[in-house]
Amino acid sequence: MASSRAPFILNFTAFVFLLLIVGCTARPFHPLPSKNNADGSRQPLQTFRPFNIAHRGSNGELPEETAPAYVRAIEEGADFIETDILSSKDGVLICFHDVTLDDTTDIANHKEFANRKRTYEVQGVNMTGFFTVDFSLKELKSLRVKQRFSFRDQQYNGKFEIITFEEFISIALGAPRVVGIYPEIKNPVFINQHVKWSSGKRFEDKFVETLKKYGYKGSYLSKDWLKKPAFVQSFAPTSLVYISKQTDLPEILLVGDINIPTQDTNQSYWEITSDSYFDYIKKYVVGIGPSKDTVVPAVNNHLQTPTDLVTRAHAHDLQVHPYTYRNENLFLHLNFSQDPYEEYDYWINKIGVDGLFTDFAGSLHNFQKWTSAKPSGDKGDRRASKLLREISLLVSSYKRA
Ligand SMILES: *[C@@H]1O[C@H](CO)[C@@H](O)[C@H](O)[C@H]1NC(C)=O
Ligand SMILES: *[C@@H]1O[C@H](CO)[C@@H](O)[C@H](O)[C@H]1NC(C)=O
Ligand SMILES: *[C@@H]1O[C@H](CO)[C@@H](O)[C@H](O)[C@H]1NC(C)=O
């Protein structure tokens, strides 16, 4: 993706004009890339610039992983909506980040569930709280989600319910343009320990079944994939290898912080980012999703010299989609003068990443729209994606031989 980036074009007059419009409307003005084409077809996924991945929806604005957070991210121009898949006690896949409900729902106010508090070992650590795996879907649906961070807008707390994986998919498929999905198989070791499905099915089997049910299939940039784009992500390499035997959807290996071993294979950060491991894992995945501070370390909030992670991953034909980009001063390294656009400029144009997980899909979309607009409307986009697809098919047939 990095090599097909459009040249830097910034039409200053248009920029000022846009600013004026923004200034004059009460609601933020987010130009939609999503108008239906005249022939009624949906506008395709853009594939000529790094992907805008809406991390847990537009969770900078709305409580994470809720339907409104995903709808907002789509309105704001996200290419992919991202989610974490966990399970209820009765085996229904849900969109929820933490294994416990404590930090992002109103579970504390539900006296009827007070006796459900448990302590379980999760990734080698004993955790106490209310676990999703101890609640039926019906019970989970009676809860309401709230903002994780106290410094974000609290007015939507208590308004939205937890959604299922299927409801999440229906939001993506119902979008006015082609919007991809980017689901994570979350804590597979823990979920497989606590939830049992009929006929010995594993969490991963239910996950792939759901994707297949809604027609998600095809290798990266294939015709099927471009119709319903999806990346499958996980921190657990064994889950990705297992899933690759059931679907050819592209997969991304998430890479945690340098002191966190993998939950399934107990491998260190250094092992799974080594050249020899990249040689192995690239048979299964199209890229890696590292924490951005492991790509460019920071000391006292100042960026240090970038590591060679992106260069080495690209040398192995692996994309790099780092996480997580956030507008707030608290998260912006001092080098960026408290300006999230400077951060995007650095990561896209200096580091050369292929996708970005952001809490503020609208900001990333505006940055990209103003600095790397479509080459020449939809036709240019289609030509670029057709070319990329042909190259990728050539490369993959060559690899298989
Ligand atoms: C978790 O708690 C159990 C019961 O007290 C104990 O046996 C186990 O060693 C603990 N595990 C960890 C990782 O601390
Ligand atoms: C994981 O690896 C570390 C370092 O090699 C080792 O100390 C630890 O005992 C291992 N843990 C498990 C659960 O195997
Ligand atoms: C970030 O700022 C620090 C302190 O001024 C400087 O040493 C470092 O080189 C800067 N890093 C980048 C990547 O610009």
Image (cartoon, rainbow, N blue to C red):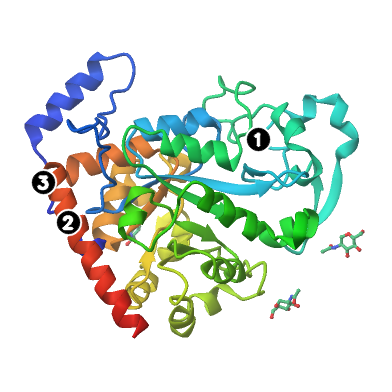
Pointer 1 residue = 104
Q: Secondary structure at mark 1?
A: loop
Q: Secondary structure at mark 2?
A: helix
Mark in front: 2 vs 1? 2
Q: Position of residue 146 (x, y in %)?
A: 62, 29
Which of the pair 348/54 is nearer the observer? 54
Q: Mark 2 or mark 1: which comes first in sequence? A: 1
Which residue does the image show at 57% across and 48% down from the upper left? 84
Residue type at mark 3: give it: Ile
Judged from the image, the quadrant occupied by ligand 3 is bottom left
Q: Position of residue 266 (x, y in %)?
A: 67, 74
Disc number for residue 384: 2
Which of the pair 11/197 is nearer the observer? 197
Looking at the rendering, in which quadrant would you find the C terminus? bottom left
Q: Give the Cα separation between the discs numbered 2 and 3.
A: 18 Å
Q: Are marks 2 and 1 in contact (CB under 8 Å)?
A: no
Q: Quadrant of residue 219?
A: bottom left
Q: Give the Cα separation between the discs numbered 3 and 1.
A: 41 Å
What is the residue that sits farthest to the right in this orientation? 115
Considering only vertical position in the picture, is 324 above or below 175?
Answer: below
Residue type at mark 2: give it: Ala
Q: Give the Cα separation between the discs numbered 2 and 1.
A: 41 Å
Which residue does the image show at 26% across and 44% down from the upper left? 44
Disc number for residue 9: 3
Q: Residues within 10 Å of mark 3 (few under 14, many from 20)?
A: few
Residue type at mark 1: give it: Thr
Q: Secondary structure at mark 3?
A: loop
Considering only vertical position in the picture, is 265 above or below 48?
Answer: below
For this view, does 192 lie left or right of residue 174?
right
Q: Are marks 3 and 1 in contact (CB under 8 Å)?
A: no
